Amino acid sequence: MDVSSVKKEPYIFAICGYKNSGKTTMITALIKELKKRGYRVATIKHDGHDFESDVPGTDSWKHQKAGAYGTAVFSQNRILVTKECTGIDEKMLFAAFWEADIILIEGLKKSTYPKYICEYPQKALIEAASLADRIEEGMKEKRNMGIVKAICISEKKGTQKHEIEEVRMIEDFGLEHDAHAGKWHRQVSLLSFEKIEEFRARGAQVAFGAFGENFVISGYDFKKCAIGTKFECGDVILELTQIGKECHHGCEIFEKMGDCIMPREGVFCKVLKGGVIKKGDLFLIMED
């Protein structure tokens, strides 16, 4: 599969306020906080007036002043495009940042985007971490996202998986150092946090990893997902390959509780694209 063909819709959030109300201060602090949490962030600034679109004195600026309606500068790592045109709105620019997780807009206070209004100095600015929390909640609601509650591996087959804080995912293999990784269709196992909590409420004393799951994810009922469903967590992309499995002979949980949720609630995936997953990362279903 060409993972670049999978659609990714950035979450749009606006930072608004009058001039000198702290918008730029808020946005720069928010960018740092969101980047620290692993998000790829782009910004769009709305200017209610005209503006100088290039640096005076540069070659591209001279090209523009000579009459070029558009100019572009590029290197191996970045591009700069300027263009004289009419009828522009912010939606036309979203496509330029299709890789972004979040697009922050400075301005557009009359828009319907979720927003934060800066009112400095009359009112102190919100802490960047608090606003980032609010954005994450909005992302989860809008994009049907889950959260990685636990990551579990076992270095040897036949031993219970134990929790770790982060893991490197290897393309077409699985979790680094996990005994069940390999060139097969069950490289990664997922189990719903809510299903584990329901099972615990029945009196089961089970730690994360006890069912043999690699990831405990809140927010999803995985058995309702179709085979072929794609999941994204940071740079990592997984594809659902199997729903449920037979409970192995002598399952301690089944013998004690008379039931085990992994055979009906657990799902398995292949790793389409590798990367690093950390506890607390957001986890989302992708659209083909």
Image: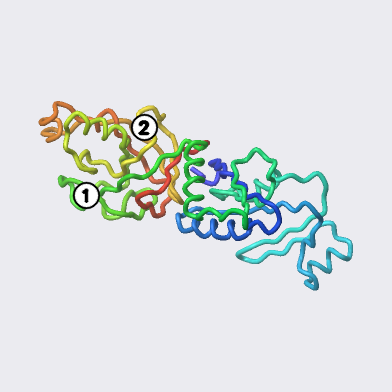
Which residue was labeled with disc 1?
A: 162
Residue shown at the point (41%, 54%) measured from the top left: 275
The residue that appears at 47% across and 48% down in the rendered structure is: 133
N-terminal-most mark, 1 or 2: 1
Q: Whole-percent x and y of residue 285?
A: 46, 37
Q: Quadrant of residue 191?
A: top left
The residue lying furthest to the right in this view is: 67
Residue 230, image x and y in percent?
45, 38
- Where in the figure is residue 26, as x and y percent of width and height? 58, 57
85 left or right, relative to 33 = right
**What label does residue 222 carry, if any?**
2
In-image side of 67 versus 79 (left or right): right
Type of amino acid at the residue the image marks with label 2: Phe
The residue nearer to you, when weighing 284 against 109, is 109
Q: Nearer the viewer, residue 262 or 119?
A: 119
179 or 103: nearer the viewer: 103
SS of the residue under disc 2: helix
Residue 102 % position (x, y): 56, 48
Q: Residue at x 87, y 65 (%)?
A: 65
Local SS, label 1: strand
- Tell me: residue 228, above or below residue 34: above
Crowd around label 2: few <14 · some 14–19 · many ≥20 (10 Å)? many
Checking the image for residue 94, the label placed there is none
Q: Rounded to the nearest whole Å, what is the CA distance between mark 1 and mark 2?
A: 22 Å
Residue lying at the far bottom of the rendered structure: 57
Please name whichever residue, 135 or 42, is drawn nearer the observer in this view of the structure: 135
The local crowd at label 1, few if under 14, some if 14 to 19, many if 20 or more residues have their Cα within 10 Å, is some
